[in-house]
Structure formats: structure tokens, C-alpha cells
């Protein structure tokens, strides 16, 4: 509903250029890695996020349709998993990285509970992009990209959920002990984006994961002390 309204309004009011953001969950659950732009709609979606993925795919196709029918300069970018300041740290609704920061911080504050429970087996691999890098990529694409096909945005690097949890632990609460709850779903085994098209256009990320986690935790500390 949101993207249909915004895209149509951009057409009605003659917006010169529109950037639509999708999500890496648009690709099939068993997609070959790394995932290329042309892999879209080549297989079944991950059941746990299928409705969200379908909505995002509909937005991409809508932008393409407006380009073809009306000549609108509407482009689409597909970011990988994002993190950074102003993220959602609620344990019931947050994504994995802010949830880990919150869990390790809470364990640190309590002090006498060194065990931190991680959902799933810890084996799935994920890619993470610092939010300021995405903002920079968006500006770059608005200035330099005018193609109908969507374009992937990420780091081109991934790690297991276990490795991510260990990285967050080492920054937030090194004394913590990891405990994996295998009754929880793992989701898609891997979601690494192919960035050949983006790198060839001249953009690369700047913030490495460890630094980004430190900056995000520093921001969260400031939030808890207000």
C-alpha cells in the first residue's frame, strides 16, 4: 500500500527521480550464492518472510512498469541486512544484530547471568551493512544509476550467526557464554549478495563490521543512560 501510493504520487507530480528500496529476502530461499540481480523469481521464497518478500518484489516491478509505460526515472536498490544507530533493539521485534547487542548488554548489567541464548543453530550466514554506508550508496545511485534493473547494495562479505554473536560478545560482554536454542528456526541458510554490478559502477562500503558494531553499541549505551 505504501509503495503503491508513493510510486503513483511520484508519477502524478512529475518527480524527476525516485529510488525504491527492496530487501535481500526477495531472492529464492535456495538461491545460488552470491545472489545476482537476475536470480529474482528463479525459485521459491523463504516461507517465514514470503509475504514481506512478495510486497518488496511488487514494488520493484511497479517501478519498472512506470518506467516502461510513462518514462519515469524510477530505480530500485536491494540492501542487505542493515544495522546502526536508531535501530530497533526490542527483543520481540528486532533483527538479529540489535537483538544480540541488547541481549549481551542486559546480561552484562545483570552480572550473574553469563549465558546468552541465541536463536537457531548459529550456522546460517548473513551479510551486514552499516546504515551510513547505505545512505552513501543511495546518494551515489541517485547521481549515477539510471537502469531499469534493480541493483544489490551490501559489503560482499558474510559470516555465520555464531561468528556474529561472538563478535558482539567480545565488544559488549566478553565473559558471556553462548547458548543456542535449536528449537527456533534458522531461516534461509545464506543470503550473500553479488555486488559485481555495484562495484563496477564505482561504489564500495567503508565501515567494517567490527567498527560498525562498536559505533552502534556506543549509541545504544547513550540511549540507556538518558
Image: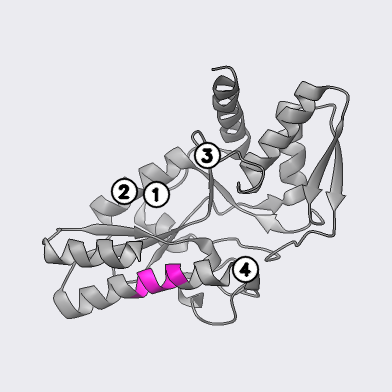
At numbered mark 2, what does the secondary structure look like: helix, strand or loop? helix
| Above or below: residue 149 compared with residue 22 | below
Q: Earlier in the sequence, mark 1 or mark 4?
A: 4
Look at mark 4 in the image and give the residue it sits on.
33
Q: What are the residue bounds of the magenta stretch?
A: 55-61
- Left or right placement of residue 188 versus residue 52 in this view: right
Residue at image position (39%, 49%) is 203
* The stretch drawn in magenta includes residue 100: no
At numbered mark 3, what does the secondary structure look like: helix, strand or loop? loop
- Left or right placement of residue 153 versus residue 25 in this view: left
Give the Cα separation between the discs numbered 4 and 3: 28 Å
Q: Residues within 10 Å of mark 1 (few under 14, many from 20)?
A: some
Look at mark 1 in the image and give the residue it sits on.
203
State yes or no: discs 1 and 2 in contact (Cβ < 8 Å).
yes
Give the Cα separation between the discs numbered 3 and 2: 23 Å
Look at mark 2 in the image and give the residue it sits on.
140
Residue 20, x across and y down, in percent? 33, 60
Residue 215 visible in this rendered orientation of the protein: yes
Residue at image position (56%, 31%) is 216
Q: Earlier in the sequence, mark 2 or mark 4?
A: 4
Q: Which mark is residue 87?
A: 3
State yes or no: discs 2 and 4 in contact (Cβ < 8 Å).
no
Residue 25, x across and y down, in percent? 55, 65
Give the Cα separation between the discs numbered 2 and 4: 25 Å
User: Number of numbered discs present?
Assistant: 4
Q: Quadrant of residue 75?
A: bottom left
Give the Cα separation between the discs numbered 1 and 4: 21 Å
Give the Cα separation between the discs numbered 3 and 1: 24 Å
Q: Quadrant of residue 76?
A: bottom left
Q: Nearer the viewer, mark 3 or mark 1?
A: 3
| Above or below: residue 179 compared with residue 214 | below
Residue 29, x across and y down, in percent? 63, 73
Amino acid at each position: 500500500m505504501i509503495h503503491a501510493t508513493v510510486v503513483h504520487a511520484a508519477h502524478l507530480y512529475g518527480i524527476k527521480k525516485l529510488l525504491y528500496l527492496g530487501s535481500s529476502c526477495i531472492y529464492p530461499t535456495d538461491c545460488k550464492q552470491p545472489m545476482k540481480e537476475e536470480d529474482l523469481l528463479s525459485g521459491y521464497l523463504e516461507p517465514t518472510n514470503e509475504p514481506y518478500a512478495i510486497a518488496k518484489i511488487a514494488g520493484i516491478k511497479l517501478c519498472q512498469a512506470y518506467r516502461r509505460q510513462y518514462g519515469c526515472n524510477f530505480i530500485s536498490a536491494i540492501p542487505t541486512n542493515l544495522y546502526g544507530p536508531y535501530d530497533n533493539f526490542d527483543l520481540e521485534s528486532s533483527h538479529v544484530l540489535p537483538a544480540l547487542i541488547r541481549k549481551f548488554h542486559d546480561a552484562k548489567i545483570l552480572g550473574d547471568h553469563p549465558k546468552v541464548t541465541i536463536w537457531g543453530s548459529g550456522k546460517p550466514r548473513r551479510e551486514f551493512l552499516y546504515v551510513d554506508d547505505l545512505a552513501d550508496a543511495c546518494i551515489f545511485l541517485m547521481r549515477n544509476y539510471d537502469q531499469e534493473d534493480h541493483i544489490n547494495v551490501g559489503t560482499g562479505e558474510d559470516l555465520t550467526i555464531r561468528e556474529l554473536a561472538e563478535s558482539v560478545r567480545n565488544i559488549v560482554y566478553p565473559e558471556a557464554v553462548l547458548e543456542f536454542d535449536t528449537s527456533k528456526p534458522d531461516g534461509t541458510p545464506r543470503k550473500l549478495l553479488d555486488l559485481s554490478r555495484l562495484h563496477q559502477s564505482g561504489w564500495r562500503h567503508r565501515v567494517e563490521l567490527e567498527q560498525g558494531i562498536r559505533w552502534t553499541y556506543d549509541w545504544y549505551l547513550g540511549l540507556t543512560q538518558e
